[in-house]
Image (cartoon, helix red, strand yellow):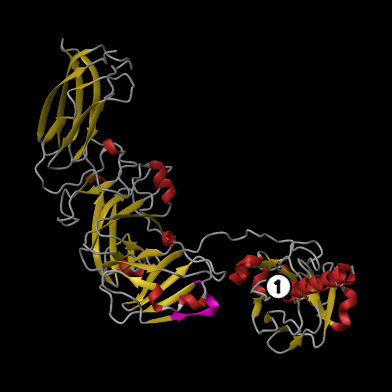
Amino acid sequence: MKICLLILILFVGKSAFTQINNPVKIKDVVINEIFADPNPSVGLPPIEFVELWNTTKKSISLKNWTYNDENTEFKFFGDTIQANEFLILCARNDTNYFKKYGRVLGLSPWPSLNNSADNLTLKSDSGLIVHKVDYTDGWYQDPKKKIGGYTLELVDHNSICEGIRNWTASTDSTGGTPGSQNSNFNIHANLTPLQLLKATLVDSVTLNLVFNRFIDSVQAVILKNFRVNNGVGNPVLIVFDGDDALSITLKFDLPLSSGKMYKIDATQISDCNGTIILPMNSSTEFYFPKKITIGDILISEILFNPRASGVDFVEIYNNSDQVLDMQNLYLNNITFPDSLKKAKRLSNIETLLKAGEYLVLTSDPAKIKAEYRTEKPDSFLKLVSFPSYNNDKGIVSLSNNNKLIDEVSYTEKMHQTIIKNAEGISLERTSFVKPGNETGNFKSAAASVGFATPGYKNSQFFNDIPGNEFNLISASFSPDNDGSDDLMQIMYKLNQPGFVANITIYNTSGKIIRKLYQNITLGTHGLVEWDGKDESDNINPVGIYLLTAEFFNAEGTVKKYRKTIILAAKLN
């Protein structure tokens, strides 16, 4: 019996010793709460304190650990912090103020806390930095609480390296939570995976990368972890700023080509918690935009007389074969060079436009999107200050680095004569080859597309390819709403803009069944559809019908087409 008891005592003793002295890891014990500016008090004693929290399920010996700020260091002796325990640290003479809140340990010397900023470090007996906090009064994120009386609380102990994004002022009515769980505690505060957000060229050999989370400095400076395609390869130098662990700067030995698209891969990079970036989040494209010259960016569409519910817009087009930066482009409503004095800058940050793409400039993109069909919702740029364009006539000018890029003079008389009220109808450029001010190069946007095409190809655009086609997609259709061949469709393609159309459906007796379109303005290409209904909105009987189309323009050109249509029924 004595032998068994002795063995049991030895076993328990060894187990307890192992539990307390297991090697600790980073964030096993964290600096959880900081009361740097206790005055004026809103409930807590007006005395500085720092709270430690054992985040593990084991007791941890603090023997020979150190806690310090920039000027003073305290060394622990035989102290232990129990599993999941909060330990309040304060000056030795102030312990009585905090005993009612929980376990307190008085320190001498006490590393006094600076109100505006301080660096606090907790090290294990082996010298491991278990937790380090470099706080500032900006971390309160509340100007009233910044004055004093409130603690700074750690939000998520799993994200200790996130700085200001993981600390905030206490929301407790007394100003803090010493000895208990923080009022802002959120164990899942940031589960967002690490992601490479953006790559921006500073110059031809310098690339800046921005991540969504703080990154680990060890992996961030390994050259082979970064690679750019198109023969560029790995950087030759990496600059990592520990104060801004969201970004790094890469240097390459050879300059990158302007106007070219590149892709960078950042592999094996981890956040400051050790989680490696996923392949789907580790790459992004970037460009080295060429300098804009005359003819690179063209004015493509102008809405100068919007509806009462709308706003003006100017659409521009990248007419080059390279990526261009709109940042230094200026828009105005008076002629160049007078326009330089009051020109409105498009953007203060890099705003890239790929070759062959459109960009809509306006004061309110949401209103444009509500008024018109938008194939590319991202092709809009909101200008804080947008030029005012008169409803009757005016000038749209684009300049870059004090040089005129494009200029168009417009008048309401440029709309097609058939249009009596041009409100809400844009003028579209028909050709990017011809000068903007050449007569006839801007025409009314087609009614068939909703009177404007913001952000995508103009309805009146043509490139001198022979057209005059008016073809049935299918000779028969069955309007029974079964999802198959429910509409009669005719595709048309014209070799010049500015046509107006009348399209009518007849039965075999020559009676008008449906006036499909009357004096509708057309684009250079599009689709004519008939749902099989008559003027009373009733489906016509099965049979043969005749469609006639007459296209005409202001120059007197007339084009006539006839198509036989079969309205059929499906056999059961």
| x, y percent for residue 313 | 35, 52
Residue 52 can be seen, yes or no? no
Question: Image height check: is 116 above or below 277?
Answer: below
| x, y percent for residue 110 | 79, 85
Residue 454 lies in the magenta stretch:
no
Residue at 25% across / 52% down in the picture? 410
The quarter of the image holding the N terminus is bottom right
Q: Closest to the observer: 136 or 274?
A: 274
The quarter of the image holding the C terminus is top left
The residue beneath circle 1 is 29
Question: Image height check: is 288 above or below 534?
Answer: below
Residue at 64% across / 81% down in the picture? 128
Instruction: Give the magenta-colored segment's residue range.
Output: 239-246
Question: Image height check: is 509 above or below 558?
Answer: above
**Which quadrant of the view contains residue 163?**
bottom right
Q: Give left or right: position of 523 versus 81.
A: left
Q: Closest to the observer: 481 or 86?
A: 86
Q: Secondary structure at mark 1?
A: strand
Q: Give left or right: position of 512 versus 326.
A: left
Residue 159 can be seen, yes or no? yes
Q: Give left or right: position of 323 versus 90.
A: left
| Crowd band around label 1 with a 10 angstrom C-alpha radius: few (<14), some (14–19), many (20+) | many
Question: Image height check: is 553 above or below 222?
Answer: above
**Which quadrant of the view contains residue 76?**
bottom right
| x, y percent for residue 254 | 28, 80
Circle 1: residue type: Val
Residue projecting furthest to the top: 509
